[in-house]
Amino acid sequence: MELIEIIKKRRSIRKYKNDEIPQEIIDELIEALIWAPSAGNLQSRKFYFIFDEKVKKNIAEAAYNQDFISEAPLVVVGCVDENKIAKYGERGKNLYGICDVSTSIENLMLVATEKGLGTCWVGGFDENKVKEILNIPSHLRPIVILPVGYPDENPNPPKRVSKNEAVEIV
């Protein structure tokens, strides 16, 4: 599959089959994370891969009871490492680090799509509760929860804005 096809095929999946993800695919997802670009190549990010059912349920509760999260066989929590990005001051903390995690997660989402997996970016959650559940150190800030698994739904593609509306040629 061409990369543009993978990009267009990716969907936000909120229903998952109970099928286990093979370890070789998990390894490829991790590779996708760590090979993403980062500000100053500081790689100011940390990811938690959660397979434990009780922990996934607690994470779903911390995400304002978005129960579909706990149905996925894997839940990834992506965090900014504020110590690593501190070199860039407030802009680093409030932008670059978030971009670093975001590019990594996008890489993972595209590899997941290529492998027949579904994902859903979840940004609505109580950061402090997630930190408590995972015992995340104070210098790490969770910015995304990403359930990953084999889709049990096939949503239609969402409408997109026109190229003219999205892009200004200068």
Image: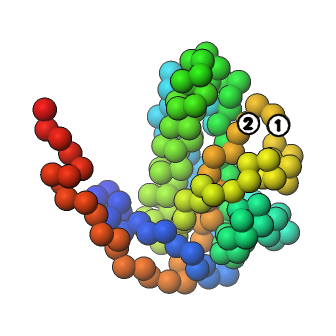
Q: Nearer the viewer, residue 86 or 116?
A: 86
Q: Where is residue 3 in the image (x, y as percent from the top left)?
A: 32, 57
Q: Distance between the residues labelled 2 and 1?
A: 6 Å
At label 2, the amino acid type is Leu
Q: From the viewer's perspective, is residue 35 above or below residue 126?
A: above
| Quadrant position of the N terminus in the picture | bottom left
Quarter location, residue 15: bottom right
Q: Can residue 121 be seen in this view?
A: yes
Pointer 2 local density, CA inside 10 Å: few below 14, some 14–19, many at least 20: some
For image coordinates 47% across by 34% down, the residue present is 37
Q: In this view, does 93 lie above or below 153?
A: above
Closer to the camera in the image, 13 or 2:
13
The residue singled out by tag 2 in the image is 140
Q: Which of the 4 image quadrants contains residue 158?
A: bottom left
Image check: 47 left or right of 56? left
Amino acid type at circle 1 is Pro
Image quarter (top left, top right, bottom left or bottom right) of the C terminus: top left
Mark 1 — residue?
A: 137
At x 55%, y 83%, the residue is 152
Q: What element carries label 1?
A: loop
Q: Residues within 10 Å of mark 1 (few under 14, many from 20)?
A: few
Can the viewer see residue 49 in this picture?
no
Q: Which secondary structure, mark 2?
A: strand
Q: What residue lies at 85% left-to-right and 54% top-to-bottom?
A: 133
Tell me residue 99's x, y (percent): 50, 37
* Horizontal and vertical percent position of residue 121: 55, 59
Say whether residue 83 is left or right of residue 31: right
- List x then y, in percent, for residue 47: 68, 46
